[in-house]
Amino acid sequence: MKKILNLSGIQKLSKEQQKEITGAARPRVYCGGPRQCCINHGGNEFCDYGYCMPNGNCIWA
């Protein structure tokens, strides 16, 4: 994590550097209701207007 905090500007990380990064996974966005996208992270749910796709994924509007 310290390597990330010390970055400045825009840099392209090598495959080796990318493998060292942990905890950067993004929770999946899902349909929480009609025209509503939700995300649940650490037990906290956030929902906002979006478009539900037939496969269950959601696109924020």
Image (cartoon, helix red, strand yellow):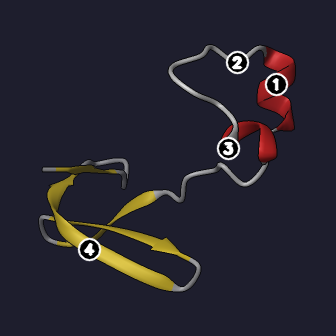
Residue 47 circle label: 4
Q: Position of residue 36 (x, y in %)?
A: 18, 68
Q: Residues within 10 Å of mark 3 (few under 14, many from 20)?
A: few
Q: Position of residue 57 (x, y in %)?
A: 36, 51
Q: Amino acid at mark 4?
A: Cys
Residue position marked by numbered label 3 in the rendering: 5
Q: Amino acid at mark 3?
A: Leu
The residue at the point 26 percent across, 74 percent down is 47
With respect to residue 53, does 9 lie above or below?
A: above
Quarter where residue 38 is shown: bottom left
Q: CA distance from mark 1 to mark 4?
A: 33 Å
Residue 3 circle label: none
The residue at the point 59 percent across, 16 percent down is 11
Mark 2 near mark 3, Cβ–Cβ under 8 Å?
Answer: no
Q: Amino acid at mark 2?
A: Leu
Mark 2 near mark 1, Cβ–Cβ under 8 Å?
Answer: yes
Residue position marked by numbered label 2 in the rendering: 13
